Image: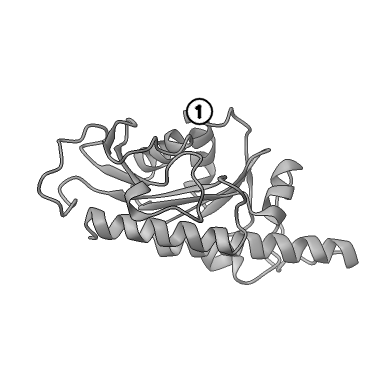
Amino acid sequence: MRGLSEGKQAVLRTAKKAYREKLMAGTSGNMSMLIPAGMEGDAMLPQAGGCHGSLMIITPSSYDYEIMEEKDIVVTDLEGNVIEGCHRPSSEWRMHAEIYQHLPHVQAVVHTHSPYATSFAVNHQEIPVVLIEMIPFLKGKLEVSAYAEQGSAQVGRNAVEILRRKNACLMANHGIVAVGESLESAYLNSVYVEDAARIYHRALVCGKPVVIPGYEE
């Protein structure tokens, strides 16, 4: 398991990549990875609270991705207490914590406001299985989790109900959240969400998209 320094580098690298690929604008979006208790790799950390002492490496709140550095990435426990870092964690840290606490298989969370996928989230509209890639990467159609106040734990709880079965979901009037067993897989899932949304949108414009047989429901 990566130590904290390597984890911070991975979160920073992935956040900058998402920003470059226009999966989020301004300071929107956030991502994190979980460091299970005892796997920090750094000897002088204070004792963490939260879920059995696990730590969360997460992007800071309202910080410019273009100037973000490793030192700006925040380490918290799953109760939001800052263990390491000079900034406040993302305002959506509760969503991340809820997902980690309820879905033991998840080791990373990527939340973006990618424009095509978010347009469907704003319409509270699911995206059916129109691409083969949606089956292995997203586990089927993209469903919409119920709206909750941004920054609240309820955002995460609503998403968890879908993420028990899927690797990503659309969040009503908000954006998308993707999960994975690694930061790399969570990010890849978020890319496939936007890809599916973009292609489905274009297909709707020029015709009537056909759902892959067996995935009509």
Q: Residue 153, position in %: x, y?
A: 47, 29
* Residue projecting furthest to the bottom: 132
Res. 130 image quadrant: bottom right
Quadrant where the C terminus sits is: bottom right
Image location (x, y in percent) of residue 52: 21, 37
Side of 104 where 146 appears, left or right? right
Question: In the image, is 78 to the left or to the right of 47?
Answer: right
Q: Nearer the viewer, residue 4 or 209?
A: 4
- Quadrant that contains the N terminus: bottom left
Q: Residue at x 46, y 39 (%)?
A: 61
Q: Secondary structure at mark 1?
A: loop
Q: Position of residue 88 (x, y in %)?
A: 39, 35
Image label count = 1
Picture coordinates of residue 91 (x, y %)?
Answer: 48, 34
The residue at the point 64 percent across, 56 percent down is 141
In the picture as drawn, the residue positioned furthest to the left comes out as 43
Q: Residue type at mark 1?
A: Ser
Query: From what the image shows, is residue 213 above or below residue 41?
Result: below
Residue 19 left/right relative to 206: left
Within-10-Å neighbours for mark 1: few <14, some 14–19, many 20+: some
Q: How is the image coloured?
A: one colour
Q: Is residue 4 left or right of residue 183?
A: left
Q: Nearer the viewer, residue 96 or 104?
A: 96
Q: Is residue 172 visible?
A: yes
At 23% from the left edge and 48% from the top edge, which residue is drawn?
Answer: 36
Considering every residue shown, the one lying at the far right of the view is: 206
Question: To which residue does mark 1 refer?
Answer: 152
Residue at 15% across, 42% down: 45
